[in-house]
Image: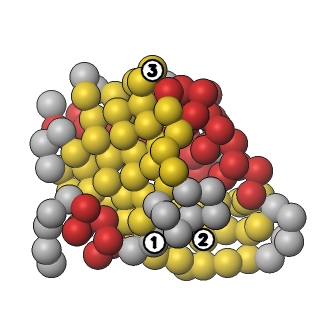
Amino acid sequence: MSEENVEVVQGLFDAVARGDIEAALQYVRPDGEWVNPDYAMEPGTRHGLSGVRTALEALRDSFADLRFDIGQMIDLGDRVLVTGTFFGVGRASDAAFGPQTFGSLVTLDGGQIRRYQWYLNAEEAREAAMLRE
């Protein structure tokens, strides 16, 4: 099942990069969660598909162009650790940014995403997954 989990997570990243919120939501459980860290502009947990939709709409509304360069996807069974960089163009500013590092820890259940947590760097994500370099 875990190889399928990696494919689900890749599908989510691909849909988000296209700005296709409906396609992204197909990978998320109805009781899914999107967790922004304490240092995010809008910290906290978004609950259910409506909460995840709100988080994804905020991403889409913030960036005219958003791309991900996935460095690693590490299969942890019911979780997938994702590290890499992202870059793009701010929608309001029209300013290019990146590459910016990121890390994500994605928990899956029944072939769908139950919890998506993001971090500013790979080390934070590894710590959340209780992994070390």
Measure the C-alpha gap from mark 3 to mark 2.
Answer: 29 Å
Q: Which comes sooner in the sequence, label 3 or label 2?
A: 3
**What amino acid is found at the position of numbered circle 2 in the picture?**
Phe
Q: Is residue 92 above or below residue 116?
A: below
Measure the C-alpha gap from mark 3 to mark 1.
Answer: 26 Å
**What amino acid is found at the position of numbered circle 1 in the picture?**
Leu
Q: Which comes sooner in the sequence, label 1 or label 2?
A: 2
In the picture of the structure, the residue carrying the numbered disc 3 is 30
Is 86 situated left or right of 29 in this image?
right
Give the residue displayed 27% in from the left and 56% down from the top.
81
Give the residue displayed 52% in from the left and 69% down from the top.
39
Asked where in the image residue 107 lies, by quadrant, the reply is top left
**What amino acid is found at the position of numbered circle 3 in the picture?**
Pro
Q: How is the image coloured?
A: secondary structure
Q: Which mark is residue 120?
A: 1
Quick one: 24 or 47, which is closer to the camera?
47
**Do we see residue 69 in this rendering?**
no
Quick one: 78 or 38, which is closer to the camera?
38
Q: Secondary structure at mark 3?
A: strand
Q: Which mark is residue 64?
A: none
Q: Position of residue 32 (x, y in %)?
A: 42, 30
Q: Position of residue 108 (x, y in %)?
A: 27, 35
Q: Position of residue 131 (x, y in %)?
A: 14, 67
The quadrant of the image that shows the N terminus is top left
Q: Which mark is residue 87?
A: 2
Q: Which comes sooner in the sequence, label 3 or label 1?
A: 3
Asked where in the image residue 64 lies, by quadrant, the reply is bottom right
Q: Position of residue 51 (x, y in %)?
A: 57, 34
